[in-house]
Image: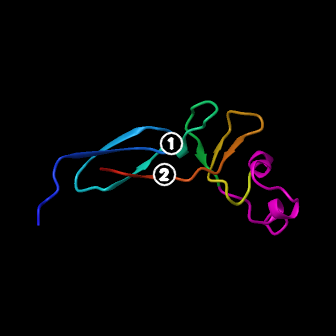
């Protein structure tokens, strides 16, 4: 068996950032989900309010797709940027990048 040595690289499919790592790593996680696409500031982790009156509100109001994204915070929200009025709620999850 041959040991993997050297450097590997991969491009993030979301932001296009080039990630470089040392072997034997085959995967890297891009941090683009942590930054606001509107202003570029680092966002804060979002903790949803799981009270029974709020939980499931997205489905009950009939919102789907982009309308849900613009409606505000929900169960799927990962990060929040408070630099905007109203705050920007991001549902972007961490992106795994294959290094080759």
- Residue 44 horizontal/vertical position (percent): 59, 45
| Residue at 48%, 45% in the rendered image | 13
Q: Is residue 31 left or right of residue 21?
A: right
**Cβ atoms under marks 1 and 2 closer than 8 Å:** yes
Q: Main secondary structure of the magenta part?
A: loop
| Residue range (magenta) | 47-72
Q: Does 62 appear in magenta?
A: yes
Q: Which residue is mark 2?
A: 95
Q: Is residue 84 left or right of residue 1?
A: right
Q: Label 1's element?
A: helix
The residue sitting at the bottom extreme is: 52
Mark number displayed over residue 32: 1
- Residue 88 horizontal/vertical position (percent): 70, 41
Q: CA distance from mark 1 to mark 2?
A: 8 Å
The residue sitting at the top extreme is: 39
**Mark 2 Cα shell of 10 Å, populated few (<14), some (14-19), many (≥20):** some
Toward the viewer: 63 or 73?
Answer: 63
Note whether 35 is above or below 100 in the view shown: above
- Residue 92 horizontal/vertical position (percent): 59, 50
Count of numbered circles in the view: 2
């Amino acid at each position: 068996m041959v040991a993997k040595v050297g450097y590997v690289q991969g491009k993030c499919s979301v932001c296009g950032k080039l990630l470089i790592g040392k072997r034997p790593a085959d995967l890297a996680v891009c941090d683009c989900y942590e930054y606001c696409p509107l202003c570029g500031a680092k966002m804060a982790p979002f903790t949803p309010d799981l009270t029974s009156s709020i939980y499931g509100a997205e489905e009950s109001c009939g919102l789907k797709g982009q309308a849900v994204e613009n409606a505000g915070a929900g169960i799927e929200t990962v990060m929040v940027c408070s630099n905007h009025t109203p705050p920007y709620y991001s549902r972007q999850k961490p992106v795994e990048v294959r290094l080759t």
